[in-house]
Amino acid sequence: MTHTISSVETATAALQQSLGGRIGSFMDGRVHTGSGDELSLTLAATGETFARFADAGADGAEAVITSAVRGAQTWRNVGAFERARILRAVAVAVEAHAEELAFLESATTGKAIRDARVEVAKVVEMFGYYSGWADKIMGQTIPVPGNWHTYTEREPYGVIVAITPWNAPVFTAGWNSAAPLAAGNAVILKPSEFTPLSTVRLAQIAHDAGLPDGVFNVAVGAGATVGSALTTDERVGKVSFIGSVPTGRRVSVATAQAGIPTVLELGGKSANIVFADADLDRAADGAISAIFSGAGQSCVAGSRLLVQREIRDAFIERVAERAGKLRLGDPLDATTEVGPIITRPQFETVQSLISTGVADGARRVTADQLPESIAGSHLAGGNWVLPTLLDGVRQGDTLETTEVFGPVVGADTFDTEEEAIARANGTRFGLAGAVWTENVSRAHFVARSVRAGTFWINAYKTIHVAVPFGGFGDSGHGRSSGPGFIEEYTQPKAVWVPTQATGAPFPSLSY
Ligand code: NAD
Protein backbone atom coordinates (compact mmCIF):
# COMPACT_ATOMS: atom_id res chain seq x y z
CA MET A 1 0.00 0.00 0.00
CA THR A 2 1.57 3.29 -1.04
CA HIS A 3 -0.98 5.77 0.34
CA THR A 4 -0.11 7.14 3.74
CA ILE A 5 -1.83 10.49 3.92
CA SER A 6 -5.54 10.94 4.55
CA SER A 7 -6.89 13.00 1.70
CA VAL A 8 -9.66 13.06 -0.87
CA GLU A 9 -7.24 11.46 -3.35
CA THR A 10 -6.48 8.61 -0.97
CA ALA A 11 -10.13 7.99 -0.11
CA THR A 12 -11.08 8.09 -3.78
CA ALA A 13 -8.28 5.66 -4.60
CA ALA A 14 -9.44 3.30 -1.83
CA LEU A 15 -13.01 3.48 -3.12
CA GLN A 16 -11.86 2.90 -6.69
CA GLN A 17 -9.61 0.01 -5.74
CA SER A 18 -12.25 -1.74 -3.62
CA LEU A 19 -15.59 -1.06 -5.25
CA GLY A 20 -14.55 0.23 -8.64
CA GLY A 21 -15.83 3.60 -7.48
CA ARG A 22 -19.46 2.42 -7.37
CA ILE A 23 -21.50 3.07 -4.24
CA GLY A 24 -24.85 1.41 -3.92
CA SER A 25 -26.81 -1.44 -2.41
CA PHE A 26 -25.54 -4.99 -2.82
CA MET A 27 -28.11 -7.53 -3.99
CA ASP A 28 -28.23 -10.47 -6.36
CA GLY A 29 -24.46 -10.49 -6.42
CA ARG A 30 -23.81 -6.95 -7.59
CA VAL A 31 -23.87 -3.28 -6.64
CA HIS A 32 -27.04 -1.38 -7.63
CA THR A 33 -26.96 2.39 -7.47
CA GLY A 34 -30.02 3.95 -5.86
CA SER A 35 -32.44 6.57 -7.13
CA GLY A 36 -33.22 8.42 -3.89
CA ASP A 37 -31.76 11.60 -2.41
CA GLU A 38 -28.07 12.33 -2.86
CA LEU A 39 -25.93 11.67 0.21
CA SER A 40 -22.30 12.66 0.63
CA LEU A 41 -19.34 11.02 2.33
CA THR A 42 -16.92 13.19 4.24
CA LEU A 43 -13.41 12.55 5.48
CA ALA A 44 -13.39 12.77 9.26
CA ALA A 45 -9.70 13.61 9.30
CA THR A 46 -9.90 16.64 7.01
CA GLY A 47 -13.56 17.62 6.76
CA GLU A 48 -13.56 17.30 2.96
CA THR A 49 -16.27 15.57 0.92
CA PHE A 50 -14.85 12.77 -1.21
CA ALA A 51 -17.87 10.99 -2.69
CA ARG A 52 -21.60 11.20 -3.26
CA PHE A 53 -24.13 8.46 -3.68
CA ALA A 54 -27.88 7.99 -4.04
CA ASP A 55 -29.95 6.73 -1.12
CA ALA A 56 -31.60 3.40 -2.04
CA GLY A 57 -34.94 4.82 -0.84
CA ALA A 58 -38.00 2.76 0.06
CA ASP A 59 -38.07 1.25 -3.47
CA GLY A 60 -34.46 0.13 -3.19
CA ALA A 61 -35.11 -1.38 0.24
CA GLU A 62 -38.11 -3.25 -1.18
CA ALA A 63 -35.94 -4.68 -4.00
CA VAL A 64 -33.28 -5.78 -1.50
CA ILE A 65 -35.90 -7.54 0.65
CA THR A 66 -37.25 -9.34 -2.41
CA SER A 67 -33.74 -10.51 -3.25
CA ALA A 68 -33.17 -11.60 0.37
CA VAL A 69 -36.46 -13.57 0.47
CA ARG A 70 -35.24 -15.57 -2.55
CA GLY A 71 -31.78 -15.89 -0.99
CA ALA A 72 -33.25 -17.15 2.29
CA GLN A 73 -35.12 -19.88 0.43
CA THR A 74 -31.95 -20.98 -1.34
CA TRP A 75 -29.76 -20.82 1.75
CA ARG A 76 -31.98 -22.77 4.11
CA ASN A 77 -31.93 -25.64 1.61
CA VAL A 78 -28.14 -25.66 1.44
CA GLY A 79 -27.01 -28.46 3.75
CA ALA A 80 -25.45 -27.57 7.08
CA PHE A 81 -22.02 -28.93 6.14
CA GLU A 82 -22.01 -27.00 2.90
CA ARG A 83 -23.04 -23.81 4.76
CA ALA A 84 -20.15 -24.40 7.15
CA ARG A 85 -17.75 -24.89 4.24
CA ILE A 86 -18.88 -21.68 2.51
CA LEU A 87 -18.63 -19.64 5.72
CA ARG A 88 -15.11 -20.98 6.30
CA ALA A 89 -14.33 -19.81 2.77
CA VAL A 90 -15.73 -16.37 3.67
CA ALA A 91 -13.40 -16.21 6.70
CA VAL A 92 -10.44 -17.10 4.47
CA ALA A 93 -11.47 -14.53 1.85
CA VAL A 94 -11.88 -11.75 4.43
CA GLU A 95 -8.45 -12.60 5.81
CA ALA A 96 -7.00 -12.45 2.30
CA HIS A 97 -8.59 -8.98 1.84
CA ALA A 98 -7.87 -7.81 5.39
CA GLU A 99 -5.45 -5.07 4.47
CA GLU A 100 -7.70 -3.82 1.67
CA LEU A 101 -10.71 -3.67 4.03
CA ALA A 102 -8.73 -1.96 6.81
CA PHE A 103 -7.36 0.56 4.32
CA LEU A 104 -10.82 1.24 2.87
CA GLU A 105 -12.24 1.68 6.37
CA SER A 106 -9.46 3.97 7.56
CA ALA A 107 -9.09 5.99 4.36
CA THR A 108 -12.82 6.66 4.05
CA THR A 109 -14.01 6.99 7.66
CA GLY A 110 -10.91 8.36 9.38
CA LYS A 111 -10.78 5.47 11.81
CA ALA A 112 -7.18 4.91 12.95
CA ILE A 113 -5.76 2.12 10.81
CA ARG A 114 -4.47 0.25 13.85
CA ASP A 115 -8.08 -0.01 15.09
CA ALA A 116 -9.39 -0.88 11.62
CA ARG A 117 -6.88 -3.75 11.36
CA VAL A 118 -7.95 -5.19 14.71
CA GLU A 119 -11.62 -4.92 13.74
CA VAL A 120 -11.14 -6.67 10.40
CA ALA A 121 -9.22 -9.46 12.18
CA LYS A 122 -12.27 -9.82 14.46
CA VAL A 123 -14.49 -10.25 11.39
CA VAL A 124 -12.28 -13.14 10.25
CA GLU A 125 -12.65 -14.62 13.74
CA MET A 126 -16.46 -14.21 13.59
CA PHE A 127 -16.87 -16.06 10.30
CA GLY A 128 -14.40 -18.72 11.46
CA TYR A 129 -16.24 -19.23 14.75
CA TYR A 130 -19.76 -19.33 13.33
CA SER A 131 -18.75 -21.52 10.38
CA GLY A 132 -18.01 -24.03 13.14
CA TRP A 133 -21.56 -23.69 14.46
CA ALA A 134 -23.33 -24.06 11.11
CA ASP A 135 -23.19 -27.88 11.19
CA LYS A 136 -23.80 -28.18 14.95
CA ILE A 137 -27.24 -26.63 15.26
CA MET A 138 -29.31 -29.36 16.86
CA GLY A 139 -32.72 -29.90 18.31
CA GLN A 140 -33.71 -32.26 21.10
CA THR A 141 -35.59 -35.51 21.53
CA ILE A 142 -38.06 -34.93 24.37
CA PRO A 143 -39.63 -37.74 26.43
CA VAL A 144 -43.41 -37.26 26.82
CA PRO A 145 -46.16 -39.49 28.29
CA GLY A 146 -47.66 -42.05 25.89
CA ASN A 147 -46.34 -43.50 22.65
CA TRP A 148 -44.79 -40.54 20.94
CA HIS A 149 -41.53 -39.64 19.34
CA THR A 150 -41.27 -35.90 20.01
CA TYR A 151 -38.37 -33.77 18.86
CA THR A 152 -37.41 -30.20 18.09
CA GLU A 153 -35.54 -28.70 15.18
CA ARG A 154 -34.14 -25.18 15.07
CA GLU A 155 -35.37 -23.28 12.04
CA PRO A 156 -33.96 -20.05 10.63
CA TYR A 157 -36.17 -16.94 10.66
CA GLY A 158 -35.65 -16.29 6.96
CA VAL A 159 -34.57 -12.68 6.38
CA ILE A 160 -32.60 -10.91 9.10
CA VAL A 161 -32.19 -7.13 8.90
CA ALA A 162 -29.16 -5.78 10.76
CA ILE A 163 -28.95 -2.01 11.22
CA THR A 164 -25.47 -0.86 12.19
CA PRO A 165 -23.85 2.36 13.47
CA TRP A 166 -20.94 4.37 12.08
CA ASN A 167 -18.37 3.79 14.80
CA ALA A 168 -17.27 0.28 13.79
CA PRO A 169 -18.78 -0.37 10.35
CA VAL A 170 -16.96 -3.49 9.18
CA PHE A 171 -16.83 -4.98 12.68
CA THR A 172 -20.57 -4.64 13.27
CA ALA A 173 -21.26 -5.89 9.73
CA GLY A 174 -19.33 -9.12 10.42
CA TRP A 175 -20.77 -9.43 13.90
CA ASN A 176 -24.35 -9.25 12.66
CA SER A 177 -23.99 -11.43 9.60
CA ALA A 178 -21.81 -14.42 10.56
CA ALA A 179 -24.20 -15.92 13.15
CA PRO A 180 -27.47 -15.42 11.24
CA LEU A 181 -25.88 -16.84 8.09
CA ALA A 182 -24.56 -19.86 10.00
CA ALA A 183 -28.09 -20.42 11.27
CA GLY A 184 -29.42 -20.54 7.70
CA ASN A 185 -30.86 -17.03 7.32
CA ALA A 186 -30.27 -14.46 4.60
CA VAL A 187 -29.12 -11.07 5.88
CA ILE A 188 -29.67 -7.48 4.86
CA LEU A 189 -27.21 -5.07 6.40
CA LYS A 190 -28.17 -1.42 6.64
CA PRO A 191 -24.93 0.42 7.44
CA SER A 192 -24.88 3.99 8.65
CA GLU A 193 -25.31 6.45 5.79
CA PHE A 194 -22.05 8.04 7.00
CA THR A 195 -19.94 4.88 6.57
CA PRO A 196 -21.41 2.36 4.09
CA LEU A 197 -18.35 1.39 2.04
CA SER A 198 -16.65 -1.40 3.97
CA THR A 199 -20.00 -3.15 4.47
CA VAL A 200 -20.69 -3.19 0.73
CA ARG A 201 -17.19 -4.48 0.08
CA LEU A 202 -17.59 -7.19 2.75
CA ALA A 203 -20.79 -8.38 1.05
CA GLN A 204 -18.98 -8.53 -2.29
CA ILE A 205 -16.10 -10.52 -0.80
CA ALA A 206 -18.51 -12.93 0.92
CA HIS A 207 -20.45 -13.41 -2.31
CA ASP A 208 -17.29 -14.08 -4.30
CA ALA A 209 -16.26 -16.62 -1.65
CA GLY A 210 -19.34 -18.70 -2.42
CA LEU A 211 -22.47 -17.26 -0.77
CA PRO A 212 -25.35 -17.62 -3.25
CA ASP A 213 -27.11 -14.55 -4.68
CA GLY A 214 -29.48 -12.86 -2.25
CA VAL A 215 -27.94 -14.37 0.89
CA PHE A 216 -25.74 -11.43 1.98
CA ASN A 217 -27.31 -8.11 0.98
CA VAL A 218 -26.67 -4.49 1.82
CA ALA A 219 -29.13 -1.61 1.56
CA VAL A 220 -27.48 1.82 1.64
CA GLY A 221 -29.14 5.03 2.69
CA ALA A 222 -30.58 6.96 5.58
CA GLY A 223 -32.46 5.62 8.58
CA ALA A 224 -35.60 7.58 7.78
CA THR A 225 -35.84 6.10 4.27
CA VAL A 226 -34.10 2.72 3.96
CA GLY A 227 -33.98 1.92 7.69
CA SER A 228 -37.65 2.52 8.24
CA ALA A 229 -38.65 0.56 5.08
CA LEU A 230 -36.59 -2.42 6.28
CA THR A 231 -38.10 -2.42 9.76
CA THR A 232 -41.74 -2.32 8.71
CA ASP A 233 -41.83 -5.00 6.00
CA GLU A 234 -43.59 -8.14 7.18
CA ARG A 235 -41.34 -10.35 5.06
CA VAL A 236 -38.52 -9.60 7.50
CA GLY A 237 -38.11 -12.35 10.11
CA LYS A 238 -36.06 -10.50 12.71
CA VAL A 239 -34.27 -7.17 13.17
CA SER A 240 -31.00 -6.68 14.94
CA PHE A 241 -30.36 -3.03 15.74
CA ILE A 242 -27.06 -1.57 16.92
CA GLY A 243 -27.07 2.12 17.63
CA SER A 244 -28.27 4.82 19.97
CA VAL A 245 -31.05 4.54 22.56
CA PRO A 246 -33.47 7.01 20.91
CA THR A 247 -33.20 5.34 17.50
CA GLY A 248 -33.39 1.90 19.09
CA ARG A 249 -36.67 2.87 20.71
CA ARG A 250 -38.06 4.21 17.45
CA VAL A 251 -37.07 1.01 15.68
CA SER A 252 -38.64 -1.08 18.46
CA VAL A 253 -41.96 0.69 18.06
CA ALA A 254 -41.88 0.21 14.28
CA THR A 255 -40.95 -3.47 14.46
CA ALA A 256 -43.49 -4.15 17.21
CA GLN A 257 -46.22 -2.71 15.01
CA ALA A 258 -45.08 -4.90 12.13
CA GLY A 259 -44.79 -7.93 14.43
CA ILE A 260 -41.04 -8.36 13.88
CA PRO A 261 -38.94 -9.55 16.84
CA THR A 262 -35.98 -7.29 17.55
CA VAL A 263 -32.59 -7.49 19.26
CA LEU A 264 -31.23 -4.18 20.57
CA GLU A 265 -27.53 -3.40 21.19
CA LEU A 266 -27.50 0.19 22.39
CA GLY A 267 -25.26 2.64 24.14
CA GLY A 268 -23.53 2.69 27.50
CA LYS A 269 -22.10 4.84 30.27
CA SER A 270 -19.80 2.30 31.83
CA ALA A 271 -18.10 2.76 35.19
CA ASN A 272 -14.45 1.94 35.65
CA ILE A 273 -13.92 1.56 39.41
CA VAL A 274 -10.41 1.88 40.87
CA PHE A 275 -9.78 0.89 44.49
CA ALA A 276 -6.79 2.11 46.48
CA ASP A 277 -5.31 -1.39 46.60
CA ALA A 278 -5.15 -1.71 42.78
CA ASP A 279 -1.97 -1.91 40.74
CA LEU A 280 -2.21 1.77 39.82
CA ASP A 281 -0.01 1.64 36.74
CA ARG A 282 -1.99 -1.20 35.21
CA ALA A 283 -5.24 0.48 36.22
CA ALA A 284 -4.12 3.75 34.60
CA ASP A 285 -3.19 1.93 31.39
CA GLY A 286 -6.58 0.22 31.53
CA ALA A 287 -8.41 3.50 32.09
CA ILE A 288 -6.68 4.99 29.04
CA SER A 289 -7.55 2.11 26.77
CA ALA A 290 -11.09 1.96 28.20
CA ILE A 291 -11.95 5.46 27.05
CA PHE A 292 -9.47 6.63 24.43
CA SER A 293 -9.12 3.64 22.10
CA GLY A 294 -11.29 4.26 19.05
CA ALA A 295 -11.32 7.92 20.18
CA GLY A 296 -14.00 6.94 22.69
CA GLN A 297 -16.46 6.01 19.93
CA SER A 298 -17.16 2.72 21.56
CA CYS A 299 -20.34 1.45 23.17
CA VAL A 300 -18.39 -0.14 26.05
CA ALA A 301 -16.12 2.89 26.64
CA GLY A 302 -15.16 3.35 30.29
CA SER A 303 -16.50 6.88 30.33
CA ARG A 304 -16.96 7.15 34.10
CA LEU A 305 -13.85 6.82 36.22
CA LEU A 306 -14.62 6.22 39.90
CA VAL A 307 -11.51 6.49 42.06
CA GLN A 308 -11.20 5.71 45.78
CA ARG A 309 -10.54 8.93 47.67
CA GLU A 310 -7.12 8.15 49.12
CA ILE A 311 -5.52 7.60 45.68
CA ARG A 312 -7.42 10.26 43.81
CA ASP A 313 -4.61 12.76 43.17
CA ALA A 314 -1.98 10.12 42.39
CA PHE A 315 -4.31 8.24 40.06
CA ILE A 316 -5.81 11.20 38.19
CA GLU A 317 -2.28 12.49 37.61
CA ARG A 318 -1.19 9.13 36.15
CA VAL A 319 -4.18 9.00 33.78
CA ALA A 320 -3.77 12.64 32.71
CA GLU A 321 -0.08 12.14 32.01
CA ARG A 322 -0.74 9.09 29.85
CA ALA A 323 -3.63 10.85 28.05
CA GLY A 324 -1.32 13.75 27.22
CA LYS A 325 1.11 11.38 25.49
CA LEU A 326 -1.42 9.72 23.18
CA ARG A 327 -0.60 10.31 19.52
CA LEU A 328 -3.30 12.04 17.52
CA GLY A 329 -2.60 12.04 13.82
CA ASP A 330 -3.24 10.88 10.31
CA PRO A 331 -5.54 7.85 10.59
CA LEU A 332 -3.51 6.03 7.96
CA ASP A 333 -0.32 6.36 9.98
CA ALA A 334 0.13 3.07 11.84
CA THR A 335 1.52 4.90 14.87
CA THR A 336 -1.63 7.03 15.32
CA GLU A 337 -3.38 6.09 18.56
CA VAL A 338 -6.34 8.47 18.49
CA GLY A 339 -8.14 9.37 15.28
CA PRO A 340 -10.86 11.95 14.69
CA ILE A 341 -14.56 11.66 15.53
CA ILE A 342 -16.01 9.85 12.52
CA THR A 343 -19.02 12.11 11.86
CA ARG A 344 -19.37 15.88 12.03
CA PRO A 345 -22.67 15.88 13.98
CA GLN A 346 -21.08 13.64 16.59
CA PHE A 347 -18.03 15.93 16.78
CA GLU A 348 -20.35 18.82 17.58
CA THR A 349 -22.17 16.76 20.22
CA VAL A 350 -18.88 15.84 21.90
CA GLN A 351 -17.69 19.47 21.98
CA SER A 352 -20.95 20.61 23.45
CA LEU A 353 -20.91 17.90 26.15
CA ILE A 354 -17.37 18.89 27.17
CA SER A 355 -18.59 22.50 27.58
CA THR A 356 -21.57 21.28 29.61
CA GLY A 357 -19.26 19.27 31.89
CA VAL A 358 -17.08 22.32 32.52
CA ALA A 359 -20.12 24.55 33.05
CA ASP A 360 -21.41 22.02 35.60
CA GLY A 361 -18.20 22.49 37.59
CA ALA A 362 -15.86 19.72 36.40
CA ARG A 363 -12.17 20.60 36.01
CA ARG A 364 -10.50 19.87 32.69
CA VAL A 365 -7.27 18.14 33.67
CA THR A 366 -5.95 17.44 30.18
CA ALA A 367 -4.82 19.86 27.45
CA ASP A 368 -7.36 21.75 25.36
CA GLN A 369 -5.17 22.96 22.46
CA LEU A 370 -4.72 20.73 19.45
CA PRO A 371 -1.06 19.97 18.69
CA GLU A 372 0.56 21.84 15.80
CA SER A 373 0.83 18.54 13.89
CA ILE A 374 -2.98 18.71 13.56
CA ALA A 375 -3.80 22.41 13.81
CA GLY A 376 -1.04 23.41 11.39
CA SER A 377 -1.47 20.62 8.86
CA HIS A 378 -3.86 19.35 6.16
CA LEU A 379 -5.82 17.77 9.04
CA ALA A 380 -6.85 21.10 10.55
CA GLY A 381 -10.43 20.88 9.20
CA GLY A 382 -11.06 17.42 10.66
CA ASN A 383 -13.22 16.36 13.59
CA TRP A 384 -10.45 16.34 16.19
CA VAL A 385 -11.13 16.08 19.89
CA LEU A 386 -8.24 15.81 22.32
CA PRO A 387 -8.32 12.99 24.88
CA THR A 388 -10.18 14.74 27.68
CA LEU A 389 -10.28 14.01 31.41
CA LEU A 390 -12.79 16.03 33.39
CA ASP A 391 -12.39 15.66 37.14
CA GLY A 392 -15.26 16.28 39.52
CA VAL A 393 -18.22 15.00 37.50
CA ARG A 394 -20.85 14.64 40.24
CA GLN A 395 -23.87 12.45 40.56
CA GLY A 396 -26.73 14.12 38.73
CA ASP A 397 -24.46 15.98 36.29
CA THR A 398 -25.22 15.60 32.58
CA LEU A 399 -21.88 13.88 32.01
CA GLU A 400 -22.70 11.28 34.63
CA THR A 401 -25.70 9.95 32.73
CA THR A 402 -25.29 10.98 29.08
CA GLU A 403 -23.30 8.88 26.64
CA VAL A 404 -20.70 11.18 25.05
CA PHE A 405 -19.37 8.71 22.46
CA GLY A 406 -16.06 10.52 22.16
CA PRO A 407 -12.70 10.64 23.99
CA VAL A 408 -14.09 12.16 27.18
CA VAL A 409 -13.94 10.61 30.63
CA GLY A 410 -15.56 12.08 33.73
CA ALA A 411 -13.89 11.25 37.04
CA ASP A 412 -15.10 11.37 40.61
CA THR A 413 -14.18 9.89 43.98
CA PHE A 414 -15.84 7.39 46.32
CA ASP A 415 -15.10 6.12 49.81
CA THR A 416 -16.69 2.70 50.21
CA GLU A 417 -17.44 -0.38 48.13
CA GLU A 418 -21.18 0.21 48.56
CA GLU A 419 -20.84 3.78 47.35
CA ALA A 420 -18.87 2.69 44.27
CA ILE A 421 -21.46 0.04 43.38
CA ALA A 422 -24.39 2.43 43.88
CA ARG A 423 -22.67 5.03 41.73
CA ALA A 424 -21.88 2.48 39.00
CA ASN A 425 -25.53 1.44 38.98
CA GLY A 426 -26.76 5.02 38.99
CA THR A 427 -27.63 5.30 35.30
CA ARG A 428 -30.24 3.59 33.14
CA PHE A 429 -27.49 1.99 31.04
CA GLY A 430 -26.02 -1.45 31.79
CA LEU A 431 -23.59 -2.40 29.06
CA ALA A 432 -20.18 -2.86 30.70
CA GLY A 433 -17.92 -1.93 33.58
CA ALA A 434 -14.71 -2.83 35.38
CA VAL A 435 -13.09 -2.98 38.78
CA TRP A 436 -9.43 -2.64 39.63
CA THR A 437 -8.40 -4.16 42.97
CA GLU A 438 -6.01 -6.78 44.34
CA ASN A 439 -8.70 -8.03 46.75
CA VAL A 440 -10.22 -11.14 45.10
CA SER A 441 -13.37 -11.23 47.22
CA ARG A 442 -14.09 -7.58 46.62
CA ALA A 443 -13.46 -7.99 42.89
CA HIS A 444 -16.08 -10.74 42.59
CA PHE A 445 -18.53 -8.96 44.89
CA VAL A 446 -18.36 -5.82 42.77
CA ALA A 447 -18.59 -7.85 39.54
CA ARG A 448 -21.75 -9.52 40.84
CA SER A 449 -23.27 -6.26 42.10
CA VAL A 450 -22.82 -4.00 39.08
CA ARG A 451 -25.69 -4.22 36.62
CA ALA A 452 -23.92 -4.75 33.29
CA GLY A 453 -23.86 -7.30 30.48
CA THR A 454 -20.04 -7.44 30.49
CA PHE A 455 -17.74 -6.83 33.42
CA TRP A 456 -13.97 -6.94 33.67
CA ILE A 457 -11.77 -7.50 36.72
CA ASN A 458 -8.36 -5.81 36.37
CA ALA A 459 -8.90 -5.50 32.62
CA TYR A 460 -10.98 -3.56 30.12
CA LYS A 461 -12.45 -4.01 26.63
CA THR A 462 -11.49 -7.59 25.94
CA ILE A 463 -14.29 -9.13 23.93
CA HIS A 464 -14.43 -12.29 21.87
CA VAL A 465 -16.96 -13.77 19.48
CA ALA A 466 -17.24 -16.88 21.68
CA VAL A 467 -18.48 -14.88 24.69
CA PRO A 468 -22.04 -13.49 25.04
CA PHE A 469 -22.30 -9.72 24.72
CA GLY A 470 -25.20 -7.36 25.32
CA GLY A 471 -26.78 -4.96 27.73
CA PHE A 472 -29.19 -4.51 30.59
CA GLY A 473 -31.66 -1.64 30.86
CA ASP A 474 -31.23 1.12 28.29
CA SER A 475 -28.23 -0.68 26.81
CA GLY A 476 -30.56 -3.12 25.08
CA HIS A 477 -31.71 -6.68 25.23
CA GLY A 478 -30.82 -9.94 23.56
CA ARG A 479 -27.28 -11.26 23.48
CA SER A 480 -24.90 -11.41 20.56
CA SER A 481 -21.77 -13.54 20.23
CA GLY A 482 -21.29 -16.95 21.73
CA PRO A 483 -23.40 -20.05 21.11
CA GLY A 484 -26.54 -18.17 22.28
CA PHE A 485 -26.37 -15.96 19.19
CA ILE A 486 -27.31 -19.00 17.10
CA GLU A 487 -30.43 -19.41 19.24
CA GLU A 488 -31.22 -15.74 18.67
CA TYR A 489 -31.37 -16.47 14.93
CA THR A 490 -33.25 -19.77 15.00
CA GLN A 491 -36.62 -20.79 16.42
CA PRO A 492 -37.40 -24.23 17.83
CA LYS A 493 -40.07 -26.23 16.02
CA ALA A 494 -41.65 -29.15 17.90
CA VAL A 495 -42.58 -32.26 15.89
CA TRP A 496 -44.85 -35.02 17.28
CA VAL A 497 -45.08 -38.51 15.74
CA PRO A 498 -47.17 -41.37 17.25
CA THR A 499 -45.04 -44.49 17.57
CA GLN A 500 -48.07 -46.87 17.63
CA ALA A 501 -50.92 -46.71 15.17
CA THR A 502 -53.31 -47.26 18.08
CA GLY A 503 -51.63 -44.52 20.14
CA ALA A 504 -53.31 -42.53 22.89
CA PRO A 505 -56.63 -40.89 21.98
CA PHE A 506 -56.32 -37.29 20.84
CA PRO A 507 -56.78 -35.14 23.91
CA SER A 508 -59.34 -32.40 23.88
CA LEU A 509 -57.54 -29.19 24.73
CA SER A 510 -58.67 -25.69 23.97
CA TYR A 511 -55.25 -24.08 24.24
P1 NAD B 1 -27.92 5.89 15.44
O1 NAD B 1 -28.91 5.33 16.37
O2 NAD B 1 -28.00 7.31 15.07
O3 NAD B 1 -27.95 5.08 14.04
C1 NAD B 1 -27.74 3.70 13.97
C2 NAD B 1 -28.31 3.17 12.69
O4 NAD B 1 -29.72 3.33 12.70
C3 NAD B 1 -27.82 3.87 11.43
O5 NAD B 1 -27.59 2.92 10.42
C4 NAD B 1 -29.00 4.76 11.06
O6 NAD B 1 -29.07 5.07 9.70
C5 NAD B 1 -30.15 3.86 11.48
N1 NAD B 1 -31.43 4.55 11.68
C6 NAD B 1 -31.64 5.84 12.05
N2 NAD B 1 -32.97 6.09 12.13
C7 NAD B 1 -33.61 4.93 11.80
C8 NAD B 1 -34.97 4.54 11.69
N3 NAD B 1 -35.97 5.39 11.94
N4 NAD B 1 -35.25 3.28 11.34
C9 NAD B 1 -34.28 2.38 11.11
N5 NAD B 1 -32.95 2.70 11.16
C10 NAD B 1 -32.62 3.94 11.52
O7 NAD B 1 -26.51 5.50 16.08
P2 NAD B 1 -25.08 5.99 15.60
O8 NAD B 1 -24.92 7.41 15.98
O9 NAD B 1 -24.87 5.57 14.19
O10 NAD B 1 -24.12 5.08 16.51
C11 NAD B 1 -23.72 5.42 17.78
C12 NAD B 1 -24.52 4.66 18.83
O11 NAD B 1 -24.40 3.26 18.61
C13 NAD B 1 -24.01 4.91 20.23
O12 NAD B 1 -25.09 5.12 21.10
C14 NAD B 1 -23.31 3.59 20.58
O13 NAD B 1 -23.21 3.33 21.96
C15 NAD B 1 -24.16 2.61 19.86
N6 NAD B 1 -23.43 1.34 19.65
C16 NAD B 1 -23.81 0.25 20.40
C17 NAD B 1 -23.12 -0.95 20.28
C18 NAD B 1 -23.52 -2.15 21.11
O14 NAD B 1 -23.15 -3.24 20.78
N7 NAD B 1 -24.24 -2.00 22.21
C19 NAD B 1 -22.06 -1.05 19.39
C20 NAD B 1 -21.70 0.07 18.64
C21 NAD B 1 -22.40 1.28 18.79
Image (cartoon, rainbow, N blue to C red):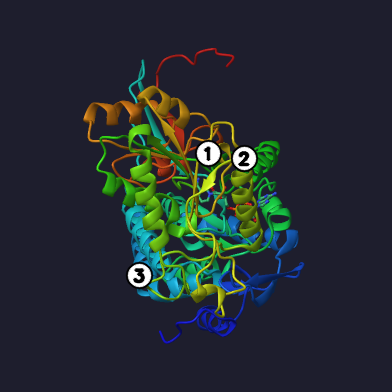
Of the 4 image quadrants, the one containing the N terminus is bottom left
Question: Which residue in the protein does label 1 denote?
Answer: 393
Q: Amino acid at mark 2?
A: Asp
Residue 232 versus residue 283: which sits nearer the camera? 283
Question: Which residue in the protein does label 2 denote?
Answer: 360
Picture coordinates of residue 424 (x, y %)? 45, 32
At x 54% / y 69%, what residue is drawn?
Answer: 109
Q: Residues within 10 Å of mark 3 (few under 14, many from 20)?
A: some
Question: Which residue in the protein does label 3 denote?
Answer: 95
* Left or right of 208, for residue 283: left
Q: Relative to 48, does residue 161 appear above or below in the rendering?
A: above
Q: Relative to 188, does residue 104 appear above or below in the rendering?
A: below
Outermost bottom residue: 2
Secondary structure of the residue carrying tag 1 is: loop
User: Mark 1 or 2 closer to N-term?
Assistant: 2
Of circles 3 and 1, the one toward us is 1
Quadrant position of residue 441? top left
